[in-house]
Image (cartoon, rainbow, N blue to C red):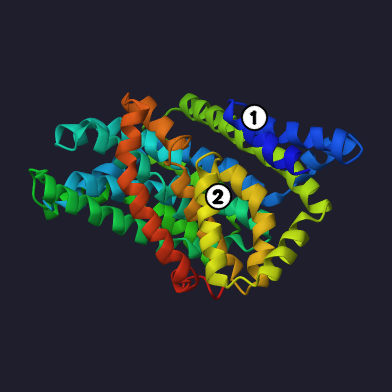
Amino acid sequence: MILSLAVLPLLLLVIGTPVFLAFLTAVAVTMIFVIPLPPVALQQVMFGGLDNYALLAIPFFVFAGELMSASGIANRLINWAMAMVGRVPGSLGVATVGASTAIGAISGSSVAAVAALGKTLYPKLVASGYGKERAGGLLASGGAIDIVIPPSIAMILYGLAAEQSIPRLFMAGVIPGLLMAAMMASFVVIVAVRNGIPPSEQSFDPAAAWKATREAFWALLMPVFVLGGIYYGLFSPTEAGGFACVYAITLALFVYRTMTVREIVRAAGNAAILSGQIMIIVAAASVMTWVVTTQGVPQAIIAWINALQLHPLAFLLAVNIVLLVIGCFLDPTSAILVFAPLLVPIAISLGIDPIHFGIVMTVNLAIGMFTPPFGLNIFVAQSVTGIPAHSLYRGVAPFVVLLVLALLIITYVPALSLTLGSNL
């Protein structure tokens, strides 16, 4: 069973097989040759894995992200971030981190942030002296913040897989996400000073900052309404996603007037395609999780861990190492759905808070989004900027080290994840 459920899908992924097909092939081979199970169970479990109300939040937030990009809301947030930074060393890089954080608070999609920021800021970063390699690395790694800052699609999936409160996960991601952003911004300033990268030619201008704030005001209110509504119990995460879509459409049609009805329909089509790609992975991962669970694998792993008498801190360190490696090959959606049902029971048995553990998993897999060789953000940044992959690998390397340090802080200081939302 180890060969069919662990080795086979890894081999299929290495040769370029789509993730969902690798999962389904591994399960089918297991059901036919290893564990005699009725074939009808395959489609029943797949459809059952999608029969969850909370999953509706995913297409809603994906659609909101598409609207944000197509309507120019992302550009308003970028301009706002640049206006607020002023003449600090590496100001444009700091603004890039700030804009990525702001976009993440709306879309929850790392890929959307990299694409939106890359088109607008990459030429400016190169012209400002960052160089193609460093600029591409900053853009690819900055998108990792979007997975941690709520609303987060990865946290929705973790909440479903681990049966944990999604609102609590959202609130738990705020401080870790801001910590990652602060560390990245500080690193950009240090690099700018050491390499003589000049600050922005324009110093902080209160009038310009006020103008940029007014232009981005309604966009900046979106995360306030979404997270505030969830926090105060006005709506569920799924309803919050629907509200985000309605809010974005209202801005695009009536406030900013940057989209037509036809363009909104086109954005809905793009969101439907991306949502379908996510959902088919969810369905395939549900089957793999079902086979693993019915065969008692989680219980066997828990018994093995207990026999080792690992300290919780040692277990967290081992999990970090494993997930950082897994993140190099699997996207967060697939990794969370497969590994959360296995690891969360072990974490709970060791006295680790499952909400804190969810943030640890999410940060790990966020780093994997820009870690070579298969980090998805690297490919998105490559397509937007035209930089060769090997150059991007060098560009992201310092940020991998930096965010691994942030991961260790988040892992061993649980209060960062548990302070907010403890009363939800």
Q: Residue at x 56, y 60 (%)?
A: 358
Amino acid on which the number 2 mark rests in the picture: Ala
Q: Residues within 10 Å of mark 2 (few under 14, many from 20)?
A: many
Which image quarter is the C terminus in? bottom right
User: Which quarter of the rendered picture does the N terminus lie within?
Assistant: top right
Under tag 2, what secondary structure?
helix
Tell me if residue 230 can be seen: no
Q: Is residue 352 above or below residue 139?
A: below
Is residue 314 shown left or right of residue 218? right
Where is residue 3? Give x, y as percent: 73, 39
Task: Give the labeled residue for mark 1.
Answer: 12
Q: Quadrant of residue 138?
A: top left
Q: Position of residue 25 (x, y in %)?
A: 74, 31
- Residue 250: x and y, percent? 45, 41
Q: Amino acid at mark 1?
A: Leu
Q: Residue at x 30, y 35 (%)?
A: 136
Q: Look at mark 2 in the image and give the residue it sits on.
A: 154
Cβ atoms under marks 2 and 1 closer than 8 Å? no
Q: Secondary structure at mark 1?
A: helix
Seen in the image, is 1 located left or right of residue 421? right
Q: CA distance from mark 2 to mark 1?
A: 24 Å
Please report the residue visible at 27 percent of the width from the left and 44 percent of the height from the top.
Answer: 96
Query: Mark 2 or mark 1: which is in front?
Result: 1
Q: Nearer the viewer, residue 218 or 132?
A: 132
Whether 46 is drawn above or below 314: the answer is: above
